Amino acid sequence: MIAHSLNPIHQPPKTLTQPLKPKAFKPQTIKCKPATIITSKLRAAVIGGGPAGSSAAEALAAGGIETYIFERSPEAAKPCGGAIPLCMLDEFSIPSHLIDRKVTQMKIISPSNLTVDFGKTFKHHEFISMVRREVLDNFLRLRAEDRGATLIKALVTNIELPISEKSPYIIHYISNNTHSSLAVDVIIGADGANSKVAKSIEAGHYTCAIAYQERIKLPEDKMKYYENLAEIYLGNDVSPDLYGWVFPKCDHVGVGTGTICSRQNIKQFQDAIRNRVKPKIHGGKIIKVEAHPIPEHPRPTRVRGRVALVGDAAGYVTKCSGEGIYFAAKSGRMCGEAIVRASENGEKMIGEADLRREYLRKWDNEYFSTFKFLDILQRIFYGSNAAREALVELCGDEYVQRMTFESFLYKRLAKGNPLLDVKMAMDTIGSLIRCNIVGKEMVQMDEFHKRML
Ligand SMILES: Cc1cc2nc3c(=O)[nH]c(=O)nc-3n(C[C@H](O)[C@H](O)[C@H](O)COP(=O)(O)OP(=O)(O)OC[C@H]3O[C@@H](n4cnc5c(N)ncnc54)[C@H](O)[C@@H]3O)c2cc1C
């Protein structure tokens, strides 16, 4: 029992909200009811019900913590390509009926339209799963509820910081036009790239890319082509610093692109990717348009006091691939488990040092080098059309493919063969030099065409 060290909850769990008159709502001046109930368990709020939040809430609730998960729009679909690695299915027990498509072929297409079959080295049981986020997120949230977390369908509007080391955080939120508040001991901020939790603890800013996607319903014969195929398009036309994609889903494809340095031109890049795939999506109908920021770096601060950030809120999206679903779920779970451990299953109050030791340090030990490595690759290969040509040329190499997919599918650094590693390094340099020449020629041809017009 930790009743003496924890601050009491305002009301009993099921009626814990304290409705306020909407007009009179002033977050800073809310007077909380005096303590009436002494809770015996640590109380945690998870803000955000995406993969990060649901995984955090599941781990917390399973570990005996009194857990509340806030999600403003449980029915909405998070804008996303929805590609997840093989290891996530096992690690997070994702049932196969949630998967729309099992991608076993992947084409990567250079600025000059050189096409490489990037999936040649897939083993017979290997594939990339394509999911719709509204399906995956709903499943993960329900599972967290089954484990004992309480889902509050509400928009969190403000967080009051504690006035002393052990006093509670007060979360203010709006649900069904009613303003309410809840006192908790710890908070996990899983509220994505525009995180309110990050702002309230002054966690600092990060650079964001903007990503744009159209869901396009294709005629049956066109959909057949993309049955188990995903495509990646590279080139200044589709993105000056990232890539364009076509990912297959149940009855449509997601066609999208992203950019960091030229966000105002995102629609122009989207037109370009649609143009590059024009014959393959001819007759298709756009059924949904979606856009959202993607963080480019971890936040300067990810833990402050008894608040920890996870997933996009923390900035855990890899460069090069823009992959964040697995890292969101993984960081959420890691953070939830860290709180369970540090609080001895909710019996003990925790502090910032616990979160740093049990969550942050473990996360950085496991993933810092992966994120750094992909950051360097992005700088080398996504900077110019010449470098992109080199990348596609290299992707033709079976050893490069195997190493890439081992790392992506299983989230472990693939064990290489030293001789082949040296060959790969030499090939990289050779490709970069060769393609620099090709790239310069392409620029000259572009300028020539412009002069002729
Ligand atoms: C166009 C696009 C394509 C992408 N494609 C891929 C891909 O193919 N594969 C991949 O791995 N990653 C992809 N990503 C990245 C991936 O979508 C994110 O990394 C992932 O969603 C992060 O999960 P999260 O749980 O941290 O945050 P989110 O998924 O953003 O979830 C945050 C949740 O918090 C809720 N919320 C926010 N604020 C509040 C509030 N104040 N109160 C209550 N609730 C709140 C939101 O409604 C949301 O449900 C893509 C991203 C974009 C934009």
Image (spheres, helix red, strand yellow):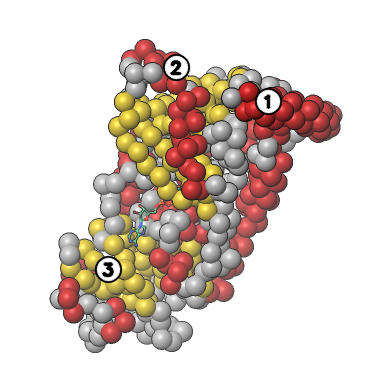
Q: CA distance from mark 1 to mark 2?
A: 27 Å
Q: Residue at (65%, 27%) from the top-left corner?
A: 451
Q: Which mark is residue 298?
A: none
Lower sequence index among marks 2 and 3? 3
Q: CA distance from mark 3 to mark 1?
A: 59 Å
Quarter of the view holding residue 9: bottom left
Name the residue that disc number 2 marks.
279
Residue 95 placement (x, y as % from top left): 38, 34
Lower sequence index among marks 1 and 2? 2
Q: Which mark is residue 448?
A: 1
Q: Amino acid at mark 2?
A: Pro
Residue at the left extreme, as displayed: 21
Q: Is mark 3 within 8 Å of ligand 1?
A: yes
Q: Amino acid at mark 1?
A: Phe
Badge 1 crowding class, 10 Å Cα cut-off, few under 14, some 14 to 19, many 20 or more, is few
In this orientation, which residue lies closer to the viewer: 221 or 250?
Answer: 221
Name the residue that disc number 3 marks.
173
Residue 305 placement (x, y as % from top left): 49, 76
Evaluate whether residue 390 shows in this view: no
